[in-house]
Amino acid sequence: MATIENPLTITEKVYVRVRLANENDIHHIYKLFYQIHEYHNYTHLYKATESSLCDLLFNKTNPSPLFYGPSILLLEVSPTPYSDIDSKDQKFKPVLKQFDLRANVIDKEANEFKSNSINDDDKNDVFIAGYSFFYANYSCFYDKAGIYFESLYFRESYRKLGMGRLLFGTVASIAANNGFASVEGIVAVWNKKSYDFYVDMGVEIFEEFRYGKMVGDALQKYADPKKI
């Protein structure tokens, strides 16, 4: 049952689809990226535009093999079931699941995140709830590529519903079924719920390593190799 208006209210069950993002999603990806910067109080560091993100994520001039370049899975929700369409043209078959709700989901941003998926011409009640962002990385520890899991984010209405397990698990499944050596990334030690989530999913935390980053003026000091 649902009311397709703003705010969107979903009761009893929510139907979920995880699919590979495409160029039609760039506006929503841009907004989700901004929201995760808001969540971490880093909006002052957010320099991307929709155009620059599109060039990064959907580079047609020099495309990378599937899942090796910057890749985004979107998790979409709907109050009604999806059709399980198996198309040979799909690079990645969407993952479908339904979740029983303990309480109503009230989404005040529904209209802003209505999906532009080209596969739902007859279905107008699909909304983007979150994403995972990942790409191939390389390490001297392995003789083949791994997956670097850059971020996972859900809009506030869709947190604590168990969907993070589905989204992260789908990335791990992609790695396991496509010859990648590992899935690795940064875990925020201050966020105990997030930390415990990744440990529960099977991630091994290496406490002896610290994440380092060089940006801005610190990086530009090395622009001229003659001055090194």
Image (cartoon, helix red, strand yellow):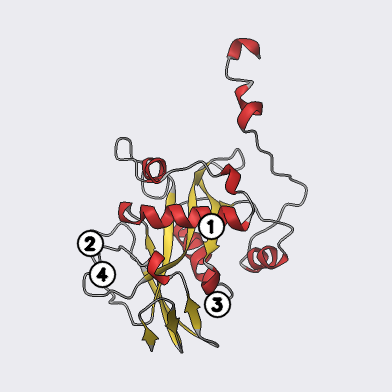
Q: On the rendered structure, is 63 left or right of 89? A: right
**Whole-number angstrom distance, CA of label 1 to CA of label 2:** 34 Å
Element class at badge 4: loop
Q: Name which of mark 1 and mark 2 comes first in the sequence.
A: 1
Type of amino acid under label 2: Lys
Horizontal side of residue 68 vs 187, given as left or right: left
Kindly report which numbered mark, 1 or 4, lies closer to the viewer in this rendering.
Answer: 1
Q: CA distance from mark 1 to mark 3?
A: 19 Å
What residue is pinned by disc 1? 35
Q: Pointer 2: residues within 10 angstroms few (<14), some, or many (20+)? A: few
Residue toward you, 114 or 139: 114
- Horizontal and vertical percent position of residue 6: 40, 76
Q: Upstream in the sequence, badge 1 or badge 3?
A: 1
Mark 1 → mark 4, Cα distance in angstroms: 26 Å
Q: Give whichever of discs 4 and 2 has the lower sequence position.
A: 2
Question: Mark 3 or mark 2: which comes first in sequence?
Answer: 2
Question: Which sits earlier in the primary sequence, circle 1 or circle 4?
Answer: 1
* Dot 3 alpha-carbon crowd within 10 angstroms: few under 14, some 14 to 19, many 20 or more: some
- The residue nearer to you, when weighing 196 against 127, is 127
- For disc 3, the marked residue is 161
Q: Which residue is under mark 4?
A: 120
At numbered mark 3, what does the secondary structure look like: helix, strand or loop? loop
Residue located farthest toward the right when viewing the structure as drawn: 208
Distance in Å between CA atoms under marks 4 and 2 = 17 Å
Residue 178 visible in the picture: no
Label 2 element class: loop
Query: Residue, x 40% and y 58% (percent of image)?
Result: 28
Viewer-side label of 4, 2: 4
Check disc 4 and give the amino acid type. Answer: Asp
User: Do the residues bearing badges 4 and 2 touch, measured as CB atoms within 8 Å?
Assistant: no
Q: What is the crowding at mark 1: few (fewer than 14 residues within 10 Å), some, or many (at least 20)?
A: some
Q: Which mark, residue 88? A: 2
